Every structure is written in structure tokens, then in C-alpha cells.
Image (tube, rainbow, N blue to C red):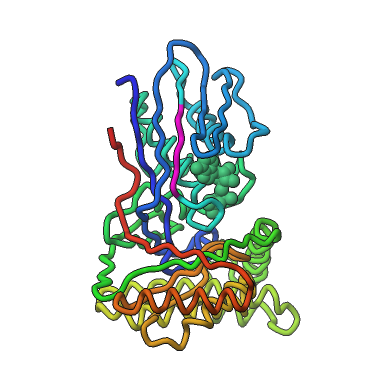
Amino acid sequence: MQSITVKAPGRINLIGEHTDYNNGFVLPAAIQKAATVTIEKRVDRLVLMNAVDLNDSISILLEEIKPSEIHWANYIIGVIVQFQKNHNFPTGFSITLKSDIPMGAGLSSSAAIECAVAYALNELFAFGIDKMELALMAQKAEQEYAGVQCGIMDQFASLFGKKDQVVLLDCKTMEYQYFPLLLEDYTIVLFDTQIKHALASSEYNTRRLECEVGVSMIQTKFAQVNCLREANLDMLNECVNASLHPIVYNRCKYVIEEMERTLAATENLVANDLAAFGEKMFATHEGLTKLYEVSCVELDALVAMVKNKKEVIGARMMGGGFGGCTINIVKKTELNKVIVNTSDAYKQKTGKDLVHYIVNIEDGAHITN
Ligand code: ADP
Ligand code: MG
């Protein structure tokens, strides 16, 4: 094989937010928007990277791979370096990248690139690495080369997604289970604030630290607890005084409740009770706003606008927070009305045009040529 084309999708997360790095549960799915890479072997030792959408390209020798000043290239370089830790590339290669995932909207355009490249290189050079290992390598690429201490969810979802199914991933054991998402008369629509407040990445790292502080406080009485996944509300109440340490207390309370909520949400799916599932999405939003404090006025406004509409059975901010999208489960027959009304209200409130994406749940990374 001299060349390969791989498509790796973006993702949504139905419920289970800010739980992955606490070793908890997430419930993501891959979507129809995807990054596509074509990788062709070369006769020399060059790695040529071409980002078609940005009309930009760079090249670097395999032996001289290092972080680049060109931001987008680091998502690719970061992956190549993970391969180089245990494998040798017999030749250089040319990578052509395209994507229709909006950048920075919280649909993980970055993870899709990493996963497409990881999947394609593994196939093209027949390294025989399994998909879970590829997900971990893609995550490391993001951590080491984009400087984001992300959990495993985005890369996992891009590689393991299945059409019309959500995946419950246990981020502690990496065990996973598929659940059909029977939307029937409903559909998923994302409302994109098109905002990314500057605090997003610093606050993300702060939240991780706050959770770690909570764990160390719980450990003073429960030495066996190594992560919030292993804690419960009783332990939290016993070890973290809510009036003395309100921030740590609230962060941990949210995470512990969200893990329980995510598991309970999968029971709603099994019982085909979409209304109960949607209620939990609203509850998640409440927790993310009030306890975890990662929302913003635009996201809160979008959720408030749909909350009392009977045609919207669930909505919440999705992703890291401080911007990005809300995810909404909306009755198909009322979809246009909901989009128009919400867009009007959003324009009135923020002066901004609201972008929306209707989402289908599709298969994860796969070869297309
Ligand atoms: P998200 O993953 O939520 O979309 P990130 O900030 O993590 O947002 O990743 C966005 C970055 O990924 C962009 O700044 C760019 O460097 C890279 N990227 C995304 N899509 C493309 C693309 N089509 N071509 C090149 N680089 C892209
Ligand atoms: Mg990203």
C-alpha cells in the first residue's frame, strides 16, 4: 500500500461532562462532520503536511521532528512523535488534511485530526497497534504538543463511535459499552455561540487541580480514594467542609453527581425514556453553571431559551465550557421553529448570529479509499 485515506469524525457528548479526567463515565458519540487525511509514502525522509482548508503547508525531516511554530501542524507532529517512541518509519510521507468540523466549537476538530493521522499511519505502515492504544497516543499528542491536559474522551469517541449509538466509556478501566440512541421523533441540534472566552484553557487546568485538591482532602480519611470516581457524597461531606472550602466542595459535588447521573442516563436509554434522559441534561447544565462554574452568559442564555419549551426535551452546554456549543434534543416537527426562535432571541440578547448544526451519529474512524 502506497497511500491511504482515513476519515475520523468529531464528537458530541450526550452527558458526562468534566468527568473523564476524574476517571468517571462519559457518553459520547461520533458525528457526520469529520477530518479526512490522505497519507502517501515518499521515497525520501521528508514529512510534508498540507492543510487544504488553511492553504498552508510545511515540511520537516523525520529525524528532525520537533514542535512547530505553526499551530495546526502540532496536532500532526504530536502524533508522529508518539509513533517514533516505539516504531521506525521506513520512509517519509505526505499528509493532506481537510475537515468540515468547525474549529474551536467544542466538537473536537483537534482530536479528529490526531485520530485520522494516527489511524492512517498505523494502517499505512502496518504497525499493528490496536485502536485503544491509538486513542491514548492521540491523547498524548494533544497533551504534549497542544498543551491541553485533556482526558481520553474526544480521541476515544472519534475512533470508537458507531452509527446511531452512544458509547458509555469508563475512563478508569477503559471498558466501554454501546447503547442505541433511539431518537425517533427527535433530533439533535447544536447551537454554536461562536465564542471562546480566553479563560477556557486556563480554567480547565484549574478545574483539574481543584478536583485533585478535593481528592487529597478526602484521602485524609479514606486513604484508598485515588480519584473522584472512587469517592461518594458521604465521603465528600465528611472530609471537605463546604463553608470553609466552598470551591473545592462544589467542584467535587458536581463531578460525583455527574458520574451518577451519567450511569442513570444509560438506564433511561435502555428503558427508552428519552424525556428522563433529557431532564438529566438540564440537571447537568445546572451543575456546570452553579457548582463547576464553567458556563458563560451566552451558554446559559441558550439553555434558558429552550428550557420551558415542551418540544425541547433536553439541553445543556457541551464540552469544556466558556463558549462552544449547547446540545439540544428537539422534536423533529418543531425543529425549524425552535431554530428560528432561538436564533432571534440570541441575536436580540447578544447581537450575534447563532450558528446551528443538525447532528447525525455516525461510525468512528475508518478507511475510505
Ligand atoms: P476543537 O478541538 O474544540 O475544535 P481546538 O482549539 O482544540 O478546538 O482545536 C482547533 C485547532 O485544530 C485549530 O486551531 C487548528 O490548529 C486545528 N484544526 C482544526 N481544523 C483544522 C483544519 N481543517 N485544518 C487545519 N487545522 C485544523
Ligand atoms: Mg480540541
| Residue 167 located left or right of residue 246 | left
Foreground of the two, 130 or 321: 321
In the image, 298 versus 180, the foreground residue is: 298
Q: What percent of the width, then of the height, locates residue 231? A: 53, 71
**The image quarter in which residue 41 lies:** top left
| Magenta span includes 214 | no
Q: Quadrant of the C terminus?
A: top left
- Where residue 95 sits in the image (x, y, percent)? 46, 28
Q: In the rendered image of this protein, does residue 28 appear above or below residue 87?
A: below
Q: Residue at x 52, y 28 (%)?
A: 49
Main secondary structure of the magenta stretch: strand
Residue 147 is situated, as x and y percent measured from the top left of the image, at 64, 45
Q: Residue at x 33, y 72 (%)?
A: 266
Look at the image and give the residue range highlighted in magenta: 95-100
Q: Residue 225: in sight, yes or no?
A: no
Q: Picture coordinates of residue 301 (x, y %)?
A: 58, 78
Which of 95 and 29 lies nearest the eye of the viewer?
95
Q: Please tell me in which quadrant of the rendered image residue 268 appears.
A: bottom left
